Image (cartoon, rainbow, N blue to C red):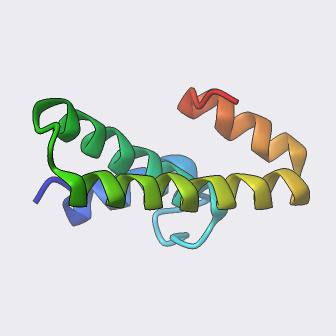
Amino acid sequence: MYLSAEKKQELFEKYGKSNKDTGAAESQIALFSYRISHLTDHLKRNRKDYSTQRALQLLVGKRRNFLDYLKAKDIERYRAIIKVLNIRK
């Protein structure tokens, strides 16, 4: 599988407060961003994979909801995660 438990722990440790902090908005946004980049690469090679295309759209929507939540709750954390993950808006 492309996303091992070790990779998840690494993402949570890097973007969350600790590797056990899996529910933080920044951790979830980082995880979704990693998965989105993986699916985007897959779709570049397999253009007619419509189920993956739908999954990608759902992930982008979920990440957008987390970003909107973070923006409303704490604008500084929002700006920091946008800058670190290089998400344009």
User: Which quarter of the rendering shows the C terminus?
Assistant: top right
Q: Position of residue 84 (x, y in %)?
A: 60, 30
> Looking at the image, which residue is at 64% across and 53% down?
64
Residue 67 rendering spot, x and y as whole percentages: 70, 52
Location of the N terminus (image quadrant): bottom left
In the image, is 50 to the left or to the right of 68?
A: left
Numbered label tally: 0
For the residue pair 83 and 58, the one nearer the viewer reads as: 58
Q: Quadrant of residue 52?
A: bottom left
Residue 7 x %, y %:
27, 54
Relative side of 43 to 54, left or right: left
Q: Residue 87 lies in what quarter of the image?
A: top right
Residue 26 as seen in the image, left or right of residue 35 = right
Q: Is residue 31 left or right of residue 55?
A: right
The residue located at (30%, 51%) in the rendering is 53
Looking at the image, which residue is at 27% across and 45% down?
39
**Residue 76 point in image, percent of width and height:** 86, 41
Task: Tell me which residue sits at (58%, 73%) in the image.
Answer: 23
Q: Nearer the viewer, residue 7 or 50?
A: 50
